[in-house]
Amino acid sequence: MDFPKLCTFNTFKQWWSHYGYEENLQDAIELEFTRTKGITYLDHAATTLYPESLVRDYVQDISRNVYGNPHSHHPSSRLTHDTVERVRYRILEHFNTTPEEYSVIFTSGCTAALKLVAESFPWSPQSESEARSLFCYFTDSHTSVVGMRGLASAQGAVALPVSPQEVENRAKDEARGKDVICQTAHLFCYPAQSNFSGRKYPLSHVRGIQTKRLYPACDHHGRWFVLLDAASHVSCSPLDLQECPADFIPVSFYKMFGFPTGLGALIVRNNAAGILKKTYFGGGTAAAYLSGEDYYVPAANISDRFEDGTVSFLDIIAINHGFEALYRITGGMHNIQQHTFGLARYTYMLLSSVCHGNGRPVAQIYAEGQFENPSTQGAILNFNLKDSHGQIIGYSQVDRMASLYNIHVRTGCFCNTGACQSLLGISNEQIRRNLQAGHVCGDNIDLVGGQPTGSVRVSFGYMSTFEDCQKFLNFVVECFVEKPVTVDQVRLEKLKTATSASQGVNEVLPIKITNGEICKVDEKEKTTESLRGFGHRNSNSHGGAYTLTNIYIYPIKSCGAFEVHDWPVGPLGLRYDRGWMVVNGNGVCLSQKREQRLCLLRPQVHLPSNKLLLQASGMDTISVPLENNTQTHASYRVCQSKVCRDRVETVDCGDEAASWLSDFLGQPCRLKRQSPDFTRHMKKKPIGAATSTSLSLVNEAQYLMINRASVELIQKVMSSRQDDSEGDQLLDTQNVISRFRANLVIAGVEPFEEDNWSHLIIGNTRFVVAGQCGRCQMIGVDQETGARTKEPLMSLSAYRNGKVTFGVYLTHQLPEGSTEAGILSTDSLIQAQPLK
């Protein structure tokens, strides 16, 4: 078969079945990458291209929201803090791990992350009692990894370059146990994927080094830590940190999303973070320090400890939009890996088989294998072109010609001298002679004495197309092949056979992704807390005719109340109270502090049909299930967010609810339900509580109770202040009650008497008072209209001399071994016990 017939899409599909995604790739190109029309961009290993929707959504985000410095505590600062924390969780989700296992430290890029490890690692010099530390790194490593040896050596460590072959060739048959004698820390660094050739190194090396089975760990006592350079790998391939629990993983986000640039991260295994010791400390990294003495205590949180100064928070916010766009367009990293590998494989097969008219090959490919499998080869193809006499054509000439065709490639050694030397056969002495001849890294001197100083690299991204391959191959044939063009059919048939075999073994079907998250639900064993009763109530406790007048649940956090008269009590409080929350486009929980219109959403729980009804004026009513159905939600991954600085795990409630909320609120939103497999505990154990208390998505405690007498007193204060209230209309009792958003409203009590209670019984349910509820500007939101006023906050502050507490938090005490406490009913009598 001649070259023109091979260079067709039908041929490509015969050789590799995976192309594009569920959505039409060409449609995505026209929508998201219109600026690339007429350009063949093949330098994705340097930086990939950002989709236009990423930047558009990002600009809308920062135009719509006020993001303050996260080190402050005002509302815009809290929004920034919560959004940044949500991005950390999103990063960990992407790499299939959790905040319990890893922390994300934001840096200015992958290089800064590497430098941070080099500066903080506890390098040990030789001593009488301990061996010196080893800094071991693959010879096929980026300059930024090799550069760590300067810092390590300065601290007395030995730098030991290791060839990829040595790691397994010199391995031991069995892993060695934990070394209790020698505690010297050693660091082994290697790339998950070579940025030079795209070769993927076994991720199993991580455990092999940690267990001291592989060289050099098997030959040296001490504690071994692994740094996995993932910058090149994660651009087009999935990385599962459950499978390869490296201690330190540096990444750069522009290689994944194209935007933002100048932002990376060091992902640190929490169990390993303790060995890193900083010398310099910047703003935000200290728990305490003295300026007049050498006294400094680092922040307890790992991320805070290592992020000197204010992080680049607006850039971090863009990462969330990067994930959204990536998953929306492609469906996930597995799909990207199959698509991009197929393009690289096809280009490799043809480029390595095309010959000049005299039968000599056109290209010298620099690769260890033959692109058999996406688990061993990434979407990078490295080569030099050769003329019909077998002489290397300088990469600068290829680059200049490619530019004429508007084809963008990378040339040189790609900041990886070790791989360049190994694959091109350049000796150490030649490197020195090349320097004497005037060649330095990054210049255009491509040949010295007829020998290449570097090569050409093409690399693919998730938006690359078959047409990119086709244009590149046609360019090579048109500009550098002596006619007639011939093809090495024997070689091509061998490669086709290898491709067919690899597809049969590594079939990966497209993965459906919803809301930018991998479709699966974590399977965890459910646990419930067994709560003990508080025992016999004091016989001297108050015996007045206190009654429960109203019960409200708020199924969706910060949305409208749903009044009930008889309602079951579950392990987290009133059943379905704050079981759901609305999150914005960045996954941050919305409240009426930021979005007042939430109060106009009127969710109702309909127990007979097992439905949560979403209702609002001018909107059709829709519903979502009250209970998670395993089959219905099997496509949704548990995601993580924050509620009142607590990490919570939630499950997405689907696109219909998201569209409904987005239409009503006028911004991208989704409905999330607290994961039934997740347990959130109350921060402070109430006095008298026997066990820890489990919470829903409430702020502080299971219940909030207010007293009608206290409400009426504040009304009187508002009335007396009316002359100073800028003409605000006096609020009626029910309006004020609704603003305080209590679960339980009681009557028959003196104003603020509830502040002095320690325990109470409502009906047959026992409660412990967990503290007073501090109030904020949210009680200024009229729950009927969404309008914001200064009252009743101003009157509350005036009456209580600046103390703005109103109502008390309660936690229930269930019978031992029970998860239900029966039914709460209005008109129930209340018995209360005052504080001693």
Image (cartoon, rainbow, N blue to C red):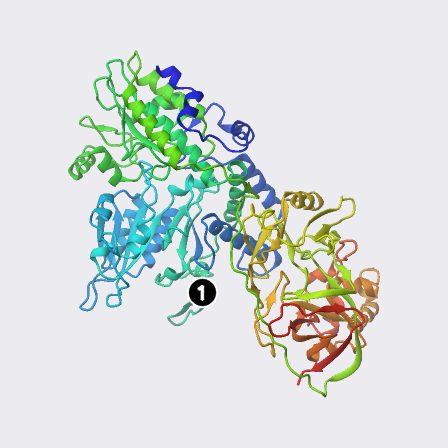
Residue 796 lies left or right of residue 59; in this view the side is right
Q: Quadrant of residue 441?
A: top left
Location of the N terminus by quadrant is top left
Residue identified by numbered label 1: 299
Q: Which residue appears at 25% of the width and 36% of the height?
A: 420
Q: Residue at the location (37% across, 21% down)?
A: 473
Question: Residue 53's spot in the image, x, y percent?
Answer: 56, 37
Q: Relative to the observer, which residue lies in front, 480 or 675?
A: 675
Instruction: Name the foreground residue: 60 vs 794.
Output: 60
Camera-side residue: 59 or 605?
605
With respect to residue 722, does 489 lie above or below?
above
Q: Position of residue 274 (x, y in %)?
A: 37, 63
Q: Nearer the viewer, residue 315 or 811?
A: 811
Q: Quadrant of residue 328?
A: top right
Check disc 1 and give the amino acid type.
Answer: Ala
| Picture quadrant where residue 497 is located | top left
Quadrant showing the C terminus: bottom right
Q: Is residue 361 above or below residue 751?
A: above
